[in-house]
Image (cartoon, rainbow, N blue to C red):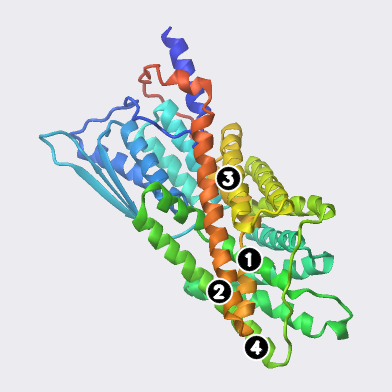
Amino acid sequence: MADFTALLNRIAGSRRATIDKVTSAPAPLQPIDLTDDARVTEVLDLAVRVGEVLLASGTSAMDVAEQVRFIAATYGLAQCDVDVTYNSIVLSAYRGPTLPPASTMRIVHYRSMDFTRLAAVDRLTRRIRREAILPDVAHEELTAVTTAPHPYNRWMATLAWAGMAAAVSVLLGGGLAIASVAFLTTMVIDRVNRVLNRWGLPFFFQQFVGGFVAAAPAATLYTFQDQLGIDIRPAQIIAAGVVVLLSGLSLVGSVQDAIMGAPITAAARFFEVVMMTGGIIAGVGLSLRLTGAVGSTLPPINVEISNLARLPVFILAGAFASLFYALACYAERRALTVAWMGGFAGAAVYAITAVIGIGPVIGSAIAATVVGFTGGLLARRALTPPLVVAVAGITPLLPGLSLYRGLYALLNDDPLLGLTALLSAFGIGCALAAGVTLGEWMARTLRRPRILQFEDSIRRPTFTRRKRPASRTRTA
């Protein structure tokens, strides 16, 4: 009977994805001596290092706190206070009335949309949950994850960003020529910003340069299109570049923090998003001003997707934009598949809402809810962190075109239309993030595998210490 119970626990733990929130602290699988300061410090450090990777990847503060608390509880520190604030994690463990509490703090100095690293930490968390590996072994595996190189060359990520821009331009109604220009422009943006990042230029100015580069080729080609014998719609190219620049911002995490009860972190993240978006707008605006100074006025654009003949192209372009975004963030193969499916579902729902006449804000919220719900279900099947599906799935729906319209109107002395378009972009962004949060909540509460429900009623056994083969220490 004991062997059967252990088998059920192993199966349940191995198939529990991040979408299945921990509802209660488990019985310690490898309880440590609370009087041993070194062992307690080792567990605290392991927990906050896992939280560091999650927070750097854009995970919401509440989810980070929950995972940190669970890892500490797994090793016997069941009474912990976790405080996650923007870029810091503070963990304090209660050790009883006769011992002082143990505390540690970690500052996150970077932002990294590395989905392979995120998935590897997710696997490590599930291994800690089901196998009770010792803290020192978990430390070794976590170090291997955080120091492992990217799964493929950086040029592959550059091509993925460029492919995403091409797919977005097609989604906005562009043809082969516009997609090609968007592809080449985004390659330049990515390579230039990588150089600027190595030089230590603040991220705001990198966004400014990206916005300038996104608009300059489109404006130049439009100015000389008669001489070149081509037909260019610059707004589609500019909007595609803006969407690529917006996709790197933690919009989903900021709104999730605001909704789930972390207002300080939400305010800090949201202000960062606003500032980085301001850098993009400033770069595009300067480029358009320089274009206007030489006597070239760019035309506005209206993208209509109510034409039923365009729906398949629109949906496929959205799906491939999500896939390319996941690839640019170094996602694993199975994550690429679920990202494509999430983008397909989101684009399809948004297209349907546009055809039946629902506004862009409500349509974006409905589509994002479907993406969040679908991502939660696919996360269980593929054991992929739901953040991968959520962020990739809503990427094609980011309001790059609304931002361009608002900026264009402001630069052409139409402040009412400009502010309306900018507020519309703000509403669409919040609707996307809120919809994803609601969809993930629905997936967590409405469909939970039976084996996990049955596992909650089983007392977890304590596994004995065993040596692991050296070849299995790397998970990345």
In whole angstroms, how far apart are the C-alphas of marks 2 and 1?
Answer: 15 Å
Which image quadrant: the C terminus? top right
| Viewer-proximal residue among 147 and 391 | 391
Q: Amino acid at mark 1?
A: Gly
Helix, strand or loop at disc 4?
A: helix
In whole angstroms, how far apart are the C-alphas of marks 1 and 4?
Answer: 21 Å
| Viewer-proximal residue among 272 and 145 | 272
In whole angstroms, how far apart are the C-alphas of marks 3 and 1?
Answer: 20 Å
Whether the residues at callouts 2 and 3 have beta carbons within 8 Å, the answer is no
Q: Which of the two labelled residues, at mark 2 and mark 4, occupies the earlier sequence position?
A: 4
Residue that carries the numbered disc 3 in the rendered image: 369
Q: Is residue 252 left or right of residue 182?
A: left
Within-10-Å neighbours for mark 1: few <14, some 14–19, many 20+: many
Q: Residue at x 72, y 85 (%)?
A: 297
Residue that carries the numbered disc 4 in the rendered image: 290
Q: Which of the two labelled residues, at mark 2 and mark 1, occupies the earlier sequence position?
A: 1
Helix, strand or loop at disc 1?
A: helix
Q: Which of the two labelled residues, at mark 3 and mark 1, occupies the earlier sequence position?
A: 3
Q: Position of residue 76 (x, y in %)?
A: 28, 31
Q: Is residue 340 above or below residue 217?
A: above
Residue that carries the numbered disc 1 in the rendered image: 400
Q: Amino acid at mark 2?
A: Leu
Q: Nearer the viewer, mark 2 or mark 4?
A: 2
Q: Which of the two labelled residues, at mark 2 and mark 3, occupies the earlier sequence position?
A: 3
Q: Nearer the viewer, mark 2 or mark 3?
A: 2
Whether the residues at callouts 3 and 1 have beta carbons within 8 Å, the answer is no
Q: Residue at x 35, y 27 (%)?
A: 26
Q: Amino acid at mark 3?
A: Thr
Residue that carries the numbered disc 2 in the rendered image: 419
Can I make out residue 475 in this image? Answer: no
